[in-house]
Image (cartoon, rainbow, N blue to C red):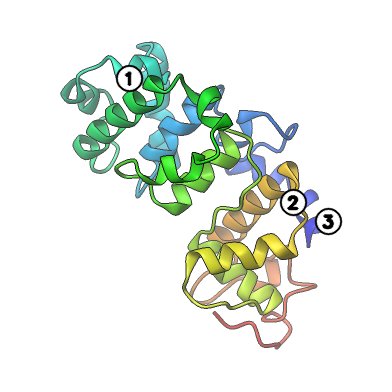
Amino acid sequence: MIEVFKNMRDELESVGWYPVDAESTRWWGGAETPDEVVITAILVQQTRWDVVHEVLNRLRELGLNTLRGIADVDPNYLAEVIKGVNYRFTKAQRLVKLARNITMIGGLEKLRLRSDVRDFLLNQEGVGRETADSIMLFALNIPTLPISQYTKRVLNRVLGINPGNDYDLWKRTLEELILRDLYIYKLVHASVVTIGKTYCLPNNPQCDKCPLRGICLYANGGRGSR
């Protein structure tokens, strides 16, 4: 499966994942800095990536593409700047709070060194488990697997894995199966999201076009069925 993902580079780039060196923030939608990863991880919740990219460019022009910059801004002003993003007023308030809290502890570099980094993130308003793990993986370069609905559907169908609906059980199961490697974890997440959005649809999956069709239990009449 990992070899298939490695051959998907062009397809991943076409939808906004950039498989460059393991520690590059560009994996995450072309983000130029860890701060941009954190900012867009909040903005992209229930919002299309093309909208988020437009907003990010606006933030860059205004010098608000850093956590320190956002920490100093009024949430109502930020809500106007991020117009187009769903739930922009709520997200503006949450982004300012998150930026202030991270800035207060010394920024992302200090956060990365903490033993409670995941708990710190989960204690922030608007940061759930998938968002926290995405920030850890793509902004802080900590090998941890985010679990999305795409992850569950694709890997259940392909490999027959189904530990239920519990996020952390899925996470533990996959992290035991997949080599703990920063590049591999980023590649797996980017690839399963891409396959889940493009081919492995909830209804009428496009199995004949899917890069994983040769090894997929579901495509070959096996037990994967989610």
In the rendered image, is residue 16 in sight? no
Query: Where is mark 2, residue-wise?
Result: 180
* Image location of residue 17, percent across then percent down: 62, 40
Q: Residue at x 62, y 49 (%)?
A: 144
In contact (CB < 8 Å): disc 2 and disc 3:
no
Secondary structure beneath dot 1 equals helix
Amino acid type of the residue tagged 2 in the rendering? Arg
Image height of 191 relative to 36, above or below: below
Q: Tell us which disc is closer to us: 1 or 2.
A: 2
Q: Which mark is residue 3?
A: 3
- What's the residue at 38%, 36% (across, down)? 51
Q: Residue furthest left?
A: 76
Q: Quadrant of the C terminus?
A: bottom right
Asked if residue 192 lies left or right of residue 83, the reply is right
The numbered dot on residue 70 is: 1
At a point 44% along the width and 41% down the height, the residue shown is 49
Q: Looking at this view, is 46 or 200 the one in front?
A: 46
114 versus 14 height, above or below: above
Kindly state the secondary structure of the residue where label 3 is placed. Answer: helix
Please, is residue 135 above or below residue 226 in the view?
A: above
Residue 162 horizontal side relative to residue 89, left or right: right
The image quadrant where one finds the N terminus is bottom right
Q: State the SS at label 2.
A: loop
Q: Quadrant of residue 23?
A: top right
- Residue 37 or 113: which is nearer the viewer? 113
